[in-house]
Amino acid sequence: MRAFWFSLPIALGAALAQTLTLYTSEVLPNVNPMIELFRRSNPGVNVQVFRSGTGEVLAKLRAEFEAGNPQPDLLWVADETYFRELAAANRLRRLRLTTPGYPARFAYQGGLYYEVRLLYNCIAVNTRRLANLPEPEYWRDLLKPIYKDLIGMPNPNFSGAALSTLGTFTQRFGFGFFEQLQRNGMRIEQSNPVLQQKLAEGQYGLAIIVDYGIRELIRQGAPLKVIYPRDGAILVPTPIGVLSTSKNPALAERFVRFLLSPEAQALFAQQGYVPVVASAPRPAGVSGEILAIPSDADYIQANRQALFNQFNALFNLR
């Protein structure tokens, strides 16, 4: 998937001090409305966005750090382990945000980076492809022969959410779980958006995938269903933080604060995400609490390269 820049227009004559640069793995159809909502109460602000998969975003930012010229004010990606690296290198600005109903556990490392909505890896099914088959209830059900050659998963080299899947399942079930999935015919697609579209088209019957995009396709009429396994969906960290090298840190902090506002939390729900603030509305199709397995960031951070090496060799990836 091609990485690209996007810039919402700046008011004529607005100063450079009113420009923010955001690096993100969040999909533009969801990011852009959020930025527009922010700009309504912050007229004249220009938000430049570099968007790609988590792996490509981090590779770009690492190269900029090596060159001594980091560009973003804000980083928003699905990889908490990289935020830990930035925190250890004193490359994040501590924020002091107070939002009623906000869970303190999502203000990581005392406010160096924040969760602003909740994202889960689930099982999504194409109900037409599975019309004559029982639906899976547990993660290990995907190993059943009845699902052979029907399963897809995003590439963890590109997708931070898929990296959470890889690390969490390897820590919980052992890497043999993926070896069994490979023998059952699981295929790898580059990203969640690519996989969800192919799932909707019926090229797959099931997918290990993030939940919010599936809900949007269901709203559009796709024959899909979100299944949160009985042994727990994977809660994927997707934090946002302000870099210590930000050229406009006060405005960057204002943007993070805005993402926790009632207006932004309600928009997240409309986009299919589960808001992080308990008082916010829930997305359509979600009621009550979701049984979740926290993504094992400690394990992923300690074994990151080994996980990539094993997975890439197994599925003949780069």
Image (cartoon, rainbow, N blue to C red):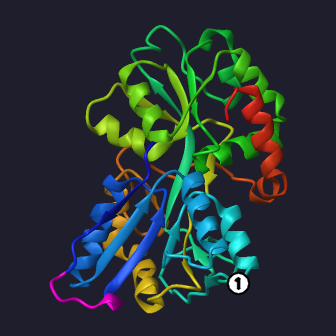
Asked which secondary structure carries label 1, the reply is loop
- In the image, is residue 207 above or below residue 150? below
Category of crowding for the residue at label 1, using alpha-carbon neighbours closer than 10 angstroms: few (below 14), some (14–19), many (at least 20): some
Asked if residue 183 lies left or right of residue 162, the reply is right
Q: Residue at x 43, y 12 (%)?
A: 131
The question of residue 247 being in magenta is answered with no
Asked if residue 26 lies left or right of residue 11, the reply is right
- Highlighted range, magenta: 11-17
Q: Residue at x 82, y 33 (%)?
A: 175
Q: Quadrant of the C terminus?
A: top right
- In the image, is residue 187 above or below residue 69? above
Residue at the disc numbered 1: 90
Mark 1 is on which residue type?
Answer: Asn
Residue toward you, 18 or 70: 70
Residue toward you, 74 or 37: 74
Asked if residue 290 lies left or right of residue 21, the reply is right
Q: Quadrant of the N terminus?
A: top left
**Residue 289 visible here:** no
Residue 2: image x %, image y %?
Answer: 43, 46
Splitting the image into 4 quarters, where does residue 316 fall? top right
Residue 220: image x %, image y %?
Answer: 26, 36
Residue toward you, 308 or 29: 308
Residue 272: image x %, image y %?
Answer: 38, 50
Q: Residue at x 49, y 56 (%)?
A: 25
Splitting the image into 4 quarters, where does residue 178 fall? top right
The tally of labels here is: 1
- In the image, is residue 12 above or below residue 205? below
**Residue 121 visible here:** yes
Q: Residue furthest front?
A: 67
Q: Residue at x 52, y 75 (%)?
A: 102
Q: Main secondary structure of the magenta part?
A: loop
